[in-house]
Amino acid sequence: MINKEKLFSRKSPPAQSARMVETIIGCKWSITVYHLLQNDINRPGEMVANVEGLTTKVLNACLKKNIEFGILQRLAFNEVPPRVEYKVTPFGEKFIHVIAQLETLQAEINT
């Protein structure tokens, strides 16, 4: 057997972006949350009320992950009773656009 020199090395994905995509796409509720925000449903109570099967605990974990990656921003208002809203950041808009492109690609594959 002849030993051939390896021409290509395995390229590792950027650690941060790969972790972000894996975490966000791995959360089955993230896409649903983005859809809710696009429809002006931006308060946690409204989100839970509008999605069957979504619990407050799961929603909070999902929102926290999205905030950590800079996709969503939490807005807390100094009111009584307290009010919290979420909005998509400029980076989040770009990220959601990429997700939408993946959905378009999937639709092309299925046709």
Image (cartoon, helix red, strand yellow):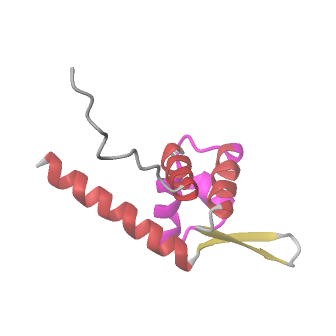
Residue 56 in magenta?
Answer: yes
**Which quarter of the figure has residue 50?**
bottom right
Q: Which residues are magenta?
A: 29-57
In the image, is residue 92 above or below residue 63? below
Residue plotted at (56% across, 50% down): 19
Residue drawn at x 70%, y 56% as measured from the top left: 64
Residue 55, position in %: x, y?
A: 65, 43
Taking the image as shown, residue 69 lies to the left or right of residue 6, namely right
Position of residue 44 measured from the top left corner of the image (x, y, whole percent): 67, 60
Residue at horizontal 30 percent and vertical 64 percent from the top = 101
The extreme top residue here reads 1
Decide whether the magenta segment is chiefly helix, strand or loop.
helix
Residue that sits furthest to the left in the current view: 111
In depth, the one of 61 and 7 nearer the eye is 7
Percent of width and height locating residue 33: 53, 58
Residue 10, given in percent of the width and then of the height, sits at 40, 44
State the count of labels.
0
Q: Is residue 108 above or below residue 26?
A: below
Front residue (pair 52, 65): 65
Q: Does residue 41 appear left or right of residue 111 in this picture?
A: right
Task: Name the residue at 53% across, 53% down.
Answer: 30
- Residue 39 visible within the image: no
Q: Is residue 34 above or below residue 54?
A: below
Query: Taking the image as drawn, is residue 103 in sight?
Result: yes
Name the quarter where the N terminus is drawn: top left
In this view, the residue in front, 59 or 107, is: 107
